[in-house]
Image (cartoon, rainbow, N blue to C red):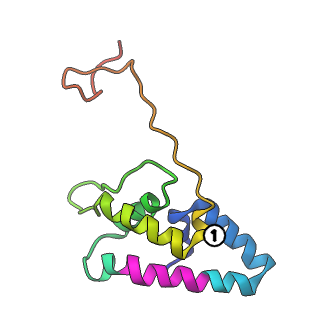
Amino acid sequence: AGSYSNVACLSPRGAQRWFALIKSDPARALEWERRIQGFIQRHIIPFIAEQKYTNTAVDKLLAAIGGWAQIGTRVRWPYRWILESEADRLRAVARTELPELMDAVAPAPAPAQNSALTGSRGDGGGKLT
């Protein structure tokens, strides 16, 4: 349980560090792998196996836990998404259980504000001014 792509969703830089470690120190990389698999089994697989969320929802959850991109956890209808509060809760767990991966996470940049877009609905979906 837990593929390389799951690790990349959680922390792209951490996945790169793990890959480099696989080549330079396989024994240590296996120790990381055991902890990664444990985290995925205990905290992520239940969203798929028990709560029946889609892989897309879980990938977005992992990215939100990692905090490297401000994409949120929402997915498009008709699919269900996992609440942001779950990402917040699991971020602390990931920092404790997988510090090498989480230390590699660069903070997500703040979303760009484009003041040139205005809309009568106040949602930015209007015309350029």
Above or below 28: residue 124: above
Q: Could you tell whether 42 is left or right of 97 in the image? A: left
Count the numbered circles shown. Answer: 1
Density class for disc 1 (Cα within 10 Å; few <14, some 14-19, many ≥20) is: some
Q: Position of residue 60 (x, y in %)?
A: 40, 60
Q: Give the residue at x 30% y 55%.
A: 74
- Where residue 119 sits, quadrant-wise, is top left
Q: Give the residue at x 54% y 79%.
A: 36
Above or below 31: residue 86: above
Q: Which residue is mark 1?
A: 100
For the magenta stretch, what is the residue range? Answer: 33-45
The answer to whether residue 34 is magenta is yes
Instruction: Please name the amino acid that badge 1 sits on.
Output: Glu
Q: Give the residue at x 49% y 79%.
A: 2
Above or below 102: residue 38: below
Q: Position of residue 110 (x, y in %)?
A: 47, 39
Q: Position of residue 102 (x, y in %)?
A: 57, 64
Classified by dominant secondary structure, the portion drawn in magenta counts as helix
Q: Could you tell whether 29 is left or right of 59 in the image? A: right
86 and 54: which is toward the camera: 86
116 and 42: which is toward the camera: 42
Q: Position of residue 57 (x, y in %)?
A: 34, 64
